Amino acid sequence: MAGLVGCRSSVSDSSGAPSAPPAVTSQTSAPVDEVREGTYLGRTLAPTMTHEGAPWLVRPEREAEESTAEMLRALELRPGQVACDIGAGNGYHSLMFAKAVGEEGQVVAVDIQPEMLDLLRARAEEAGAKNVVPVLGEATDPKLGEARCDLIFLADVYHELSDPPAMLGHFRRALRPGGRIALLEFRAEDPEVPIKPLHKMTKAQIDRELEANGFTRLGSYDALPWQHLMFFGVR
């Protein structure tokens, strides 16, 4: 999540892997702190926010802007579940998930920047969240393993993936039977959302990309101030 402008109801319903997901068109393999030039299914891929922007992730006004508590309720996490937070950063959502899944559950907090994970570890230790497991992932491999996750959650992260088909393939394998992917993305349909267009997505584009990679929409929560919350399962 990078280059954003500003400070930053209802649920509607909507096996096997696809034969060949469309390829990513990319001209560079830029490091995380550079602008990445590439497209996927007609969408320009966005650059990733670096660890230098970590304070922005825990800004005091974030709850008011994004209704995070309401979003958490919509996820319907239960004690004992395994929640995988992709692009976890310094743990804004991970620590909330840790409380929701309880001591018998686990939060797998994945980030590709060691500096972010250092910040996350410090915050988890301060909060006494012993069920948070930091994982150093790669740009094309979240290092989740097989059939591990009840929920794979991406908050304003999916649009920054450098290779969506590769990551979605790993997500598909990492989900337990009945597991879900939850994508939280700023609404591109709404010009009033004060975020740069590169860092927004439409529901139609999200559906297009997930369906091309073997997922089907299970539902969506549409009452958040600025964001889509969309749920997908393996087709």
Image (spheres, grey):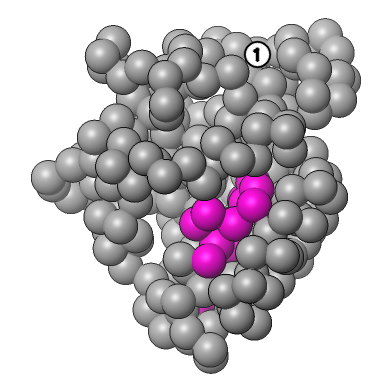
Q: Is residue 135 above or below residue 55?
A: below
Q: Is residue 53 above or below residue 191?
A: below
Q: Quadrant of the N terminus?
A: top right
Q: Nearer the viewer, residue 142 or 18?
A: 142
Q: Residue at x 28, y 63 (%)?
A: 73
Question: The residue tagged with tag 1: helix, strand or loop?
Answer: strand
- Residue 51 is drawn in which quadrant? top right
Could you tell me residue 75's position as x and y percent? Answer: 34, 61
Say which amino acid is labelled 1.
Answer: Thr
Along the horizontal axis of the image, is 120 left or right of 190? right
Could you tell me residue 228's position as x and y percent? Answer: 32, 36
Span colored in magenta: 81-95
Q: Is residue 134 above or below residue 7?
A: below
Q: Residues within 10 Å of mark 1 (few under 14, many from 20)?
A: some
Q: Residue at x 32, y 68 (%)?
A: 76
Could you tell me residue 15's position as x and y percent? Answer: 50, 56
Q: Is residue 90 magenta?
A: yes
Query: Outermost residue, left direction?
Result: 9
Q: Is residue 36 magenta?
A: no
Q: Nearer the viewer, residue 227 or 37?
A: 227
Q: Circle 1 sits on which residue?
A: 39
Q: Residue at x 72, y 55 (%)?
A: 119
Q: Residue at x 75, y 16 (%)?
A: 36
Q: Nearer the viewer, residue 158 or 166?
A: 158
Could you tell me residue 32's position as x and y percent? Answer: 80, 28
Evaluate whether residue 106 shows in this view.
yes
Q: Is residue 111 above or below residue 222?
A: below
